[in-house]
Image (cartoon, rainbow, N blue to C red):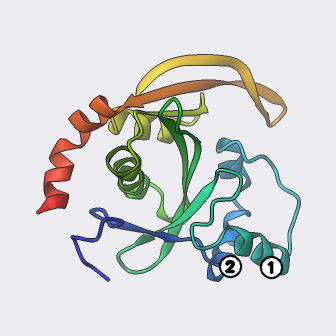
């Protein structure tokens, strides 16, 4: 499908529901221990294909499990290039968060930015959220660049909060209001609406 009017499609990616068919890619992604640590997922115990399939089945089809909705990011060749989470949704205060990961062979191609922009549009333009709160570990340069490119502002730092590889790291806090999103997304949204 390459329909530019489809809401869940950006300039180079589309979001689709997580599926049990993503098991092989999920198992392969777990082999990237440094990447998973950088995303604060830690070093996970080894798992089997059956256990991974069962875990994905629980979260498949955009099912909301404890406030977490998972998407698969695809490029226009239909390749699974990563995942996106939509979580920490607070309707009372109007804020939410997200997490994004791109698998190792596909990093550095703009997939994370494009896919995150799709989710931000959904949360701000369709769900009426006011602010997105996000964070990353201090040495995750790619995540810092992603946030800044999308218009996020650095709002603070939690010192020595994240532990991996035998030491503590600071967590950087980012925020994006609806007005800031609109200002940053306007040129891209015009392309999307055409």
Q: CA distance from mark 1 to mark 2?
A: 8 Å
For residue 12, above or below residue 37: below
Relative vertical location of residue 9 with respect to residue 22 in this rendering, above or below: above
The N terminus lies in quadrant: bottom left
Kind of element beneath mark 2: helix
The count of marks equals 2
What residue lies at 42% left-to-right and 41% top-to-bottom? Answer: 146
Q: Are marks 1 and 2 in contact (CB under 8 Å)?
A: yes
| Residue found farthest to the front | 92
**Residue under pointer 1:** 49
Q: How many other residues sit within 10 Å of disc 1, few (<14), some (14-19) or many (≥20)?
A: few
Residue 36 or residue 62, whichever sits in front: 62
Picture residue at 58% right of the left edge, 71% below the top: 18
State the residue at coordinates (40%, 31%): 176
The image shows residue 1, relative to residue 99, as above or below, that is below
The single residue placed furthest to the left in the displayed view is 194
Q: Quadrant of residue 8?
A: bottom left
Q: Along the horizontal axis of the image, is 174 left or right of 139?
A: left
Residue 81 pos. (x, y %): 50, 68
Residue 36 is situated, as x and y percent measured from the top left of the image, at 69, 51
Residue 78 locus on image (x, y percent): 42, 80
Residue identifier under label 2: 24
- What is the crowding at mark 2: few (fewer than 14 residues within 10 Å), some, or many (at least 20)? few
Given residues 134 and 42, the one toward you in this image is 134
- The percent position of residue 118, horizontal first and vertical second, equals 36, 55
Does residue 62 appear left or right of residue 32 in this picture?
left
């Amino acid at each position: 499908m390459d329909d530019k009017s489809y809401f869940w499609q950006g300039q180079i990616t589309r979001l689709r529901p997580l599926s049990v068919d993503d098991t092989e890619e999920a198992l392969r992604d777990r082999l990237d221990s440094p990447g998973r640590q950088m995303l604060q997922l830690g070093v996970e115990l080894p798992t089997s294909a059956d256990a991974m399939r069962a875990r994905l089945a629980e979260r498949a089809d955009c099912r909301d499990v404890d406030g977490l909705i998972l998407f698969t990011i695809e490029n226009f060749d239909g390749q699974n290039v990563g995942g996106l989470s939509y979580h920490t949704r607070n309707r009372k205060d109007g804020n939410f968060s997200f997490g994004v990961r791109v698998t190792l062979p596909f990093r550095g191609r703009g997939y994370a930015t494009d896919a995150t922009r799709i989710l931000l549009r959904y949360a701000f333009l369709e769900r009426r959220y006011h602010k997105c709160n996000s964070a990353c570990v201090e040495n995750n340069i790619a995540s810092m660049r992603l946030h800044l490119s999308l218009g996020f502002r650095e709002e603070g730092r939690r010192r020595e909060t994240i532990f991996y590889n035998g030491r503590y790291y600071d967590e950087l806090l980012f925020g994006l209001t609806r007005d800031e999103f609109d200002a940053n997304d306007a040129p891209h949204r015009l392309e999307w609406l055409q």
